[in-house]
C-alpha cells in the first residue's frame, strides 16, 4: 500500500490505532485497577495477588521480542487481530479464576497475547505515514493508553459498587470484541516493495540496536517501567492505606493519572518537535521532572491526599513522556536498517522487565518497610534514570545524527 498523504486519511489511521491501543490497555490494566478490591474481597495478600500482574509483565516483555521479530516478517494486521482474540478469551476466563495461581496462569497468557499489539503497530505507522507524521501519529496513538486507563478507572468503582470487581473483565471483553471487528474492517494491509525489503536486509547486520549507547537506553527504559507501572498499580493501595479511604474512592482518584499522562505526552511531543530533536535529551529532561515530582510526593506524604494524588499523577505522567521518547520515537531511527518492529519489541520488553520486578517489589516494600521507604525508592529510581539519559546524549548523537 502507498504511504498516506491525505490529512483526513492520516488522522483516520491515527484514530483507529489509538482506539486499538486503548482497548489493548483496557484489557491489560483492568486487573491492576481492581487489585486493591480483590485483596479486600478474597483475603489474599497484596504480594500474592500481585503475582498475576508481575507474571503478565514478564510474558508481555518476553513476547515483545518475539512479536517484534515476527512483526518485521508477517502481516502486522493479522498479528494484532490474533492478540485481541486471545486477550478477549483470557479476560472472560478471569471471571472464573478461583485462586491467585489460576489468575497468574490466565494473566500470563493475556500478557503474551498483549505483546502482539505495539511492535506490529509501530511497523504499520512507519510504513503508512511520513517521518514527520509519524511523530504526531505515534503521540496520538499513545493517548489511547491514557484514555483506556481513564475509562477503566472510571468504570471500575461503578462496577464494584453495583456488582463486584470481576465484572470489569466482562466490560473489557466486550470492548475487545467490538475492536476486533472495527480493526479488521478499517486497518489496511501493507506490502513493501521488494527492493526496499532487499536493501533493508543488506543493512540489517549494521543495525546499532545493541550498541553500548542502546544498552544505556535499555537500562533507562527499565527504570521508566519500574516507575510508570509500579506507581500506577499501587497508587490506589497507597492512597487507601495512607489516608484511610475506601478502595472505590482510591481507585477513582487514579483517573487523574492518565489525564496528566495525556498532557505529558503532548508536552513531550512539542518539546521533541520544537526544541530538542534528540529524543534522549527530551527523555533526560522529563526524567528530571519526574524526580522532582517524586521528591514532592515523598516530602508531603500523609499530609494532604490531594497533594499525594497530584504528585503521583505528575510522576507517572512524566514516565509516560519518557516512554513516548524511548519506546515510540527511538524505534523509528531503525527503519533504514529494516528492523523497526524488532527494535520496538526489544525496547518495549525492557519496560516490562522493570514493570515486572517493581510491581511485585513495591508490594513487598510497602508490606515490609512501609510506604515512606517505598516513596524514597521511587525518587532514587527517577534520579538514576535522569543520570543515565544525560550520559547517553552524546553517544546517541554520534550514531544517529
Image (cartoon, helix red, strand yellow):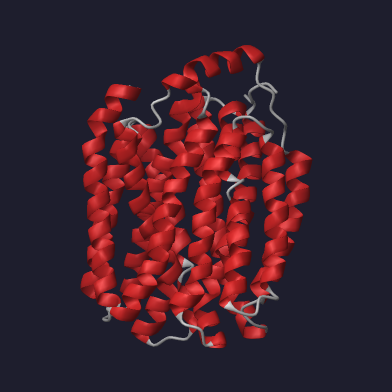
Quadrant where the C terminus sits is top left
Residue 169 locus on image (x, y percent): 66, 69
Q: Is residue 275 visible?
A: no
Identify the residue at image location x=62%, y=37%.
11
Would you place residue 216 above or below residue 200 in this image? below
Could you say which quadrant of the image residue 30 lies in? Answer: bottom right
User: Image check: 173 left or right of 387?
Assistant: right
**Which of the image's four quarters has the N terminus?**
top right
Give the left or right position of residue 198, taking residue 343 as reference: right
Q: Which residue occupies 28% across, 37% down? A: 281
Residue 334, image x, y percentages = 46, 27
| Residue 55 versus residue 372 in the image, above or below | above
Q: Residue at left 56%, top 35%?
A: 69
Q: In front here: 178 or 392?
A: 392
- 91 up-or-down from 329: above or below: below
From this view, report whether residue 156 is shown above or below residue 136: below
Task: Count up the numbered dots.
Answer: 0
Dividing the picture into quadrants, the one containing residue 189 is top right
Q: Is 55 placed left or right of 190 in the picture? A: left
Please provide percent x and percent y for residue 237: 42, 78
Q: Position of residue 134 (x, y in %)?
A: 52, 32
Q: Where, by quadrant of the figure, is residue 97 drawn?
A: bottom right
Foreground pick, 190 / 337 = 337
Regarding residue 204, the answer to whether it shows in the image is yes
User: Which residue occupies 29% across, 56% down?
Assistant: 290
Amino acid at each position: 500500500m502507498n504511504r498516506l498523504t491525505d490529512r483526513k486519511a492520516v488522522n483516520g489511521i491515527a484514530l483507529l490505532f489509538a482506539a486499538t491501543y486503548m482497548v489493548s490497555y483496557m484489557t491489560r490494566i483492568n486487573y491492576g485497577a481492581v487489585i486493591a478490591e480483590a485483596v479486600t474481597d478474597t483475603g489474599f495478600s497484596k504480594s500474592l495477588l500481585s503475582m498475576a500482574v508481575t507474571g503478565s509483565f514478564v510474558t508481555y516483555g518476553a513476547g515483545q521480542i518475539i512479536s517484534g521479530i515476527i512483526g518485521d516478517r508477517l502481516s502486522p494486521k493479522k498479528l494484532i487481530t490474533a492478540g485481541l482474540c486471545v486477550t478477549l478469551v483470557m479476560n472472560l476466563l478471569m471471571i472464573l479464576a478461583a485462586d491467585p495461581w489460576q489468575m497468574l496462569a490466565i494473566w500470563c497468557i493475556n500478557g503474551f497475547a498483549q505483546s502482539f499489539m505495539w511492535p506490529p503497530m509501530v511497523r504499520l505507522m512507519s510504513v503508512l505515514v511520513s517521518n514527520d507524521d509519524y511523530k504526531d501519529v505515534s503521540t496520538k496513538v499513545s493517548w489511547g493508553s491514557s484514555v483506556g486507563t481513564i475509562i477503566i478507572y472510571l468504570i471500575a468503582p461503578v462496577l464494584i459498587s453495583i456488582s463486584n470487581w470481576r465484572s470489569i473483565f466482562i466490560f473489557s471483553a466486550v470492548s475487545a470484541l467490538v475492536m476486533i471487528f472495527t480493526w479488521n474492517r478499517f486497518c489496511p494491509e501493507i506490502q513493501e516493495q521488494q527492493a526496499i525489503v532487499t536493501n533493508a536486509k543488506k543493512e540489517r547486520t549494521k543495525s546499532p540496536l545493541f550498541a553500548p549507547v542502546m544498552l544505556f537506553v535499555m537500562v533507562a527504559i527499565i527504570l521508566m517501567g519500574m516507575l510508570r507501572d509500579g506507581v500506577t498499580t499501587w497508587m490506589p493501595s497507597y492512597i487507601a492505606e495512607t489516608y484511610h479511604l475506601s478502595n472505590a474512592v482510591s481507585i477513582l482518584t487514579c483517573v487523574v493519572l492518565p489525564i496528566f499522562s495525556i498532557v505529558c505526552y503532548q508536552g513531550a511531543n512539542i518539546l521533541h518537535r520544537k526544541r530538542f530533536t534528540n529524543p534522549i535529551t527530551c527523555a533526560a529532561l522529563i526524567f528530571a521532572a519526574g524526580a522532582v515530582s517524586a521528591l514532592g510526593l515523598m516530602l508531603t506524604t500523609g499530609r494532604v491526599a490531594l497533594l499525594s494524588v497530584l504528585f503521583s499523577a505528575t510522576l507517572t505522567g512524566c514516565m509516560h513522556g519518557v516512554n513516548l521518547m524511548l519506546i515510540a520515537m527511538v524505534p523509528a531511527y531503525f527503519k533504514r536498517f529494516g528492523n523497526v518492529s524488532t527494535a520496538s519489541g526489544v525496547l518495549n520488553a525492557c519496560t516490562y522487565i522493570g514493570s515486572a520486578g517493581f510491581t511485585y517489589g513495591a508490594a513487598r516494600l510497602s508490606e515490609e518497610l512501609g510506604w515512606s521507604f517505598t516513596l524514597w525508592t521511587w525518587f532514587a529510581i527517577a534520579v538514576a534514570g535522569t543520570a543515565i539519559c544525560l550520559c547517553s546524549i552524546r553517544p546517541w548523537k554520534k550514531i544517529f545524527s
